[in-house]
Amino acid sequence: MTLSLEQLLAAKEVAICCGAGGVGKTTTAAAAAAMAAVSLGGKVLVLTVDPARRLADALGMEELGNTEVRVPDSVMKAAGVAPRGELWAAMLDAKQSWDELVRRHAPNQATVERILENPLYLNITGRFAAGNEYIAMERLYEIHRTGVYDLIVVDTPPTRHALDFLEAPDRMAEFFSSRLLRWLTAPSRSKMLTLASRPFYQVADRVLGSQFLQDIAEFFLLFQTMYDGFVERSNAVKRLIHGRRTTFVVVTSLEATPLREAEFFMEALGRMGLHPGALVLNKVLPSYLLDPAAGRVAERLRSDGPALAAEVGPEAGAPPAVTRVLREVGESFLNFGVVAKREAEQRAELAYRPDVIVAVPFFETDIYDLAGLLRHGTALWAG
Amino acid sequence: MTDLLDRRLLFVTGKGGVGKSTAAAALALLSATRGRRTLACEVDAKGDLADFYETSRPGFEPQKVASNLWHMAMDTEASLREYLHLQLRIPAISRLGPLARVFDFVSTAAPGVREILTVGKIGWEVRERHYDLVVVDAPATGHIVGQLTAPQAINDLVRVGQVREQTGWLADLLADPAATGLVVVTTPEEMPVNETIELVHKVRHETRIDVAAVVVNRVLPELFSGADEEIFERLSEPALSDRLADAVHGPVAPVLEAARLAVTLRRTRAGHLDHLRSALDAGVPLLYVPYLFTRGHGLRTTGKVAEALSAELGY
């Protein structure tokens, strides 16, 4: 059965867009959300992780923050649409989201403050991106739970390995229940007596110094007070992304590397029991480049310039200049034709075919406003 | 200023999809063909370098792929094992129990451990002069600063211990512009250009590493000069395009349409390129690589990119 993206999203509450970097994931997420708000109605939220100022601009906002804001009616009107629903947008602020998580789960105010000031905590949430995968899913869960939105479209973080964020809840839960963590946070008296752990401690002490180990221990001791809440939460997040109301939209271009990643991703989603609902082929070159008759014309323009220039006549310009232009035109068509042909081959070789496959044409100009976003969205909707 | 390929360590980064790995593979290939022993090191372990050299996937042990050229894939656990063995002379690693679990734990607990093991291994290869040049296919723009500042971050967190003593020389190596440089790869498109400008700014403020070059990949050729474009416009009008269609006995419209697409694309991109040039000061050389009009991988493509870079570098 062939579905459209419109039909797919009409039946879902959460759509998670994923794919390699640079394929137009953020734009696709925003365009799909805008189309849903316009044609499906209800309250639609696009949650992005990318600090893309251009997207904020396109939505008519100064900047996007952790709190959801509604795209003003005036912006909708300027784009020439009278939406049935409301479009909302938010950008994930990882640090702020972590802080909120700590406030929610820590047993008391004193612990909250100690965690928020711990140098390791600051480092994890500030300097390194590793925690972002988890917090993105956590934030999605938090928003979904409020029941305010009919549809939430999520743009996932640019991970090194696309599956990281799906496994993040599991890893987080596993981590907090690990024996090593319990050992490290146990009173030091019993720690020294645990024979099995001595070599590890000795090595760690030599390499890192005991002060650092104590810092780590304190950090985890504090974090452990949130253990129950955290594990419960991780499981709830997992239930949400596995739920029947959640679907995945894999975005890719038809270049070899992102496409290979997309295929790997679709296959992995299926294996993990998740719902790979749609594949969006982005930036697809126009199909006229594949027309063999046009190809023959291009060949003639390239090789037969002087004769053709003579037939067209002097109104076009001086014959040598016209010849040059015809050659460039033919050459350019053939050049782009090579790329288009390669794309078509890649497309034909797709091993994994979800219910919805959408091809979005290459737009030669950038998106600067909601109208541009909707133009992209219309192509996405129509497939 | 030190010539790009006369340095000893180059980190190559860029936004996803701009051809970062291609550029890294090509720079290493170019260095090797110029007679320098070169190691290409892949950090993301996606196996892209193997595609670009048309070889089997490398492991942690460097593998020779051509004359003067080796490649390896970073593996932080293997790096830790090597470090413990070489630096601390800890032979009985097995007594640590399942190292993988311990390592997983420590690296999650102590941010920057993965990064330091990556940068540390690379820095060590450079310091020991096993190669004349190490080219790192580094993480994408979002992760590179975390990687490059890892030695400093560890220094801030770990106040004593052997790690502390060993992050010093590493930080010095990274900060030496005669030895180390960062190459940022971009395409003349809006988002990659903006990310490149932001990254260069961030690298200069938050790290001590030198931005050695910006590689602009997939630069489209200019189709027409100004006067020729007027001819093209006249040819596109119905009267002349019909005459042309009669002359070639075939559909002319799609061919003219494709040329228009190429012109628009080139024009949009030229604007982004101007923006990039004006945002970067003259101290950062820009190297242009033309759009190759193939979407293939492989050694041939890598060779073509290397040729373009070679011409840009004046070799």
Image (cartoon, rainbow, N blue to C red):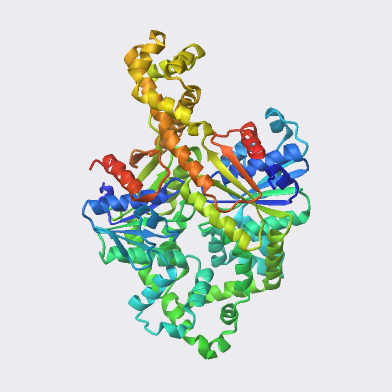
Picture quadrant of residue A108: bottom right
Vertical relation: A369 (above or below) A105:
above
Kindly identify the residue that appears in the image at 31 percent across and 53 percent down: B28
Kindly identify the residue that appears in the image at 56 percent across and 56 percent down: A265
Q: Nearer the viewer, residue B46 or A306?
A: A306
Q: Nearer the viewer, residue B181 or A85?
A: A85
Vertical relation: B92 (above or below) A101:
below
Instruction: Provide residue B172's location: percent of width, then percent of height.
Output: 33, 61
Instruction: Provide residue A276's location: percent of width, then percent of height.
Output: 64, 54
Q: Nearer the viewer, residue B151 or A82?
A: A82
Picture quadrant of residue A36: top right
Residue located farthest toward the front when viewing the structure as drawn:
B249
Q: Is residue A253 left or right of residue A93?
A: left
Instruction: Provide residue B179's location: percent of width, then percent of height.
Output: 28, 56
Give the quadrant of the C terminus of chain B: top left
Q: Is residue A170 left or right of residue A300?
A: right
Does the image show residue A70? no
Vertical relation: B171 (above or below) B256:
below
Kindly identify the residue that appears in the image at 48 percent across and 45 percent down: A255
Q: Is residue B9 left or right of residue A383?
A: left
Instruction: Provide residue B297's location: percent of width, then percent of height.
Output: 40, 49
Number of numbered discs present?
Answer: 0
Residue located farthest toward the left when viewing the structure as drawn:
B35
Does the image show residue B73? yes
Kindly identify the residue that appears in the image at 49 percent across and 23 percent down: B251
Picture quadrant of residue A166: bottom right
